[in-house]
Amino acid sequence: MSLFFSIVMPAYNEEECIEQVVTMWTSFLKKTFPNKETKLIVINDGSRDNTKVILDRIAPSIDNLLVVHQPNGGHGNAVVNGYRKAAELNSEWVFQTDSDDQFVTEDVVKLWDKRNESNFILGYRQIRHDASARLLITRILKYTISFVYGTFINDANIPFRLIKGSYLKALLSQLPNPEPFAPNIFLAVMAKKAGQKTFDIPIVHKERLTGTVSILRWKLLKVCIQSFKELLRFRLELNGKVRAIKAATK
């Protein structure tokens, strides 16, 4: 099986909005690419609420929806497993977003319009509706990346990115082992250092109206410290990985 366009979407405890979000994104795929093979790949990351029940109920009636259930491994792990599934299905283009209904489908077109200029294109939450602690840590990580790697990315961890499928395969093969907590950051750094224009396109970020944020307060600080340490360690491996990515995508 080969796909023209796939969307990777991790989901955890989103029973209040998951059906609405799935309907929104699968409808977007059919409207935008009516004559192409497309798929929304939802990775249910061991949800403890009714997310699994809802997904299993609606999946048979939505032909461009693929649901994968996994034990809870965290957001980053769910994203990577979704990417690997998209690669397994030979997706020509892979888009990644979250299931919390904080983005609008129309903004995908802004990234899509740049597809002939880059293999790795990022959105940028210019006005971000998140808790102040999360905003602060995002800012710290942004300048950490700039300081450690000498490259500036506005929103390296954003779940709103468009990646050429063949390029994604090359990036995934170079992800550090063990798998980092926030793999999207590492994918963005590798792509940027390998010469891709990320563009950092301003997009809409809506206030979260349902569910709960899973990482808060001290846990958020702990995650920040963990990510900082992972980024420092990765500095020693980066040049070799960038060379490998360039060689694989010539």
Image (cartoon, rainbow, N blue to C red):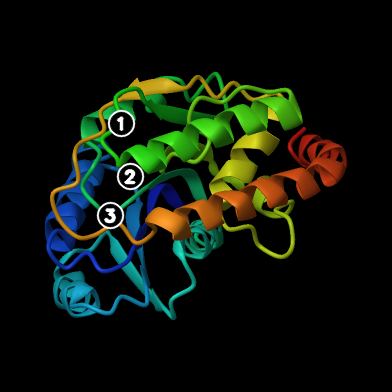
Real-space Cα separation, disc 2 to disc 3, in angstroms? 23 Å
Label number found at residue 245: none
At label 1, which amino acid type do we have? Arg
Crowd rating for badge 3 (residues with CA inside 10 Å; few <14, some 14–19, many 20+):
many
Q: In this view, does 162 lie to the left or right of 101?
A: right
Relative side of 138 to 102, left or right: right
User: Label for residue 99?
Assistant: 3
Q: Quadrant of residue 32?
A: top left
Say which of marks 2 and 3 sits in front.
3
Q: Which residue is drawn at 47% across and 61% down?
A: 82
- For the residues bearing labels 1 and 2, Cβ distance under 8 angstroms: no
| SS under mark 3 | loop
Q: Is residue 194 visible?
A: no
Quick one: SS at disc 1? Answer: loop
Q: Is residue 60 left or right of residue 230?
A: left
* Label 1 – label 2 distance at C-alpha: 33 Å
> Residue 164: horizontal and vertical position, in percent?
54, 38
- Residue at image position (19%, 39%) is 207
Q: Mark 2 points at which residue?
A: 36
Residue 20 x/y as whole percent:
12, 55
Whichever of callouts 2 and 3 sits on the residue coming sooner in the sequence is 2
- How much space separates mark 1 and mark 3, taking CA atoms? 16 Å
Which numbered tag is attached to residue 128?
1
